Structure formats: C-alpha cells, structure tokens
Amino acid sequence: MRESASWRGTDSSWNRRRPRTEVGSWPTGEVAENPQYFRTCASGLVTEMHAGLEGLMSAMYLRQLAVHVRRGQAGRVREGLSGGGLTYGYAPVPGKRGERTIVEAEAEIVRRVFAEYVAVRTPRDIAIDLNRDKVRPPRGEFWSAGTIHGNRARGRGCSPTRSMTAA
C-alpha cells in the first residue's frame, strides 16, 4: 500500500497533514466516524453549521438578485423599452437594445384573439380555430388554451390579465 499526502484535486493544508491510509480510500479517524462532516472540492471539510450558513447566504443572494433584476426590468419599461424576452407580435429592432417593432402578420393574430375573446369565446375554442387555420403559435407546435389565457402570475398569454391592463 502506498500512502498519499493529499486528496486528488485539492491542495488544502488539512489534507497534506492527514494522509490517506490507502489510495482512493475515504478518510479515517474523526471525519470518518462522524457522519455530520463531509468534504467538497470547493470548500474542503464541511460541517452542519457550515452547510446551514452557506445555504442561508445562497438564499439571501438569490432573493437580492431577484429584487435587482425586477428593478432593472421596471426601469427599462418606464423608459419605454422591453423589460426582456420576446413578445408575440413584436420583433427586436436591430442595433437598438430593448426597442421593439410591430410584426404586422402576428399583430393580426393578436387582434383576432382579442376580438374572439371579447366575443365571449373560450380560450380553448380560440386555440382550436387557430390550429385548424394552421396559424403558427408563439412557441411550440400548437396553440392551447394556456397560450391564450397564459399564466396570470407571470403575466403571460394573450388575454387581458391584470398586468396587461395596469398601466
């Protein structure tokens, strides 16, 4: 048996001071006997407290990132620019970030959907008619009721959700 002075891929001083007993074996002693410890390539030895704090910091970072992204998108919308993503009926203006131009062929479809929606047709019936007429949907292969009424929480879809009418 050959002793190795460190773990593969790591160079921490902890690993150099505690050699493995066999090539490719797990550590022995305190770390091996205590299941609350584990080792990662990025952080080395990780305890329950370390894992909990790192999880908390990650959650806080993601929350702050979401706040900053939404604030940035809202600012772009206030400036009359797109907040992000492609909207059915619009195309990006080449060379002008955030600006959109109307795609007349798709705009006709949007007008048709709104007219049928106002005429009290169900989103399912509208989708069936669009598929029968072989109208290309915004995404995927077929129109569905979800394409028409969308997701109220995300403000997606063609129907006038609260986010579309609140301006």
Image (spheres, helix red, strand yellow):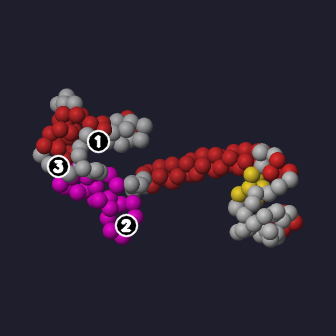
Q: Amino acid at mark 3?
A: Val
Q: Which mark is residue 147?
A: 1
**Residue corresponding to mark 3:** 135
For mark 3, give the secondary structure.
Answer: loop
Image coordinates of residue 5 in percent, x first then y, are: 82, 70
Q: Are marks 3 and 1 in contact (CB under 8 Å)?
A: no
Which amino acid, mark 1? Thr
- Sequence-first tag of 3 and 1: 3
Q: Which residue corresponds to the image point at 84% horizontal and 65% vertical from the top-left?
A: 19
Q: Residue at x 32, y 42 (%)?
A: 157
92 drawn magenta = yes
Which residues lie in the magenta part?
A: 86-107
- Answer yes or no: do the residues labelled 3 and 2 have beta carbons within 8 Å? no
Number of the label disc, if any, that sits on residue 128: none
Q: Nearer the viewer, residue 23 or 77?
A: 23
Q: Dot 2: few (<14), some (14–19), or many (≥20) neighbours within 10 Å?
A: few
In this image, 126 relative to 18: left or right? left
Residue assigned mark 2:
96
Q: Earlier in the sequence, mark 3 or mark 2?
A: 2
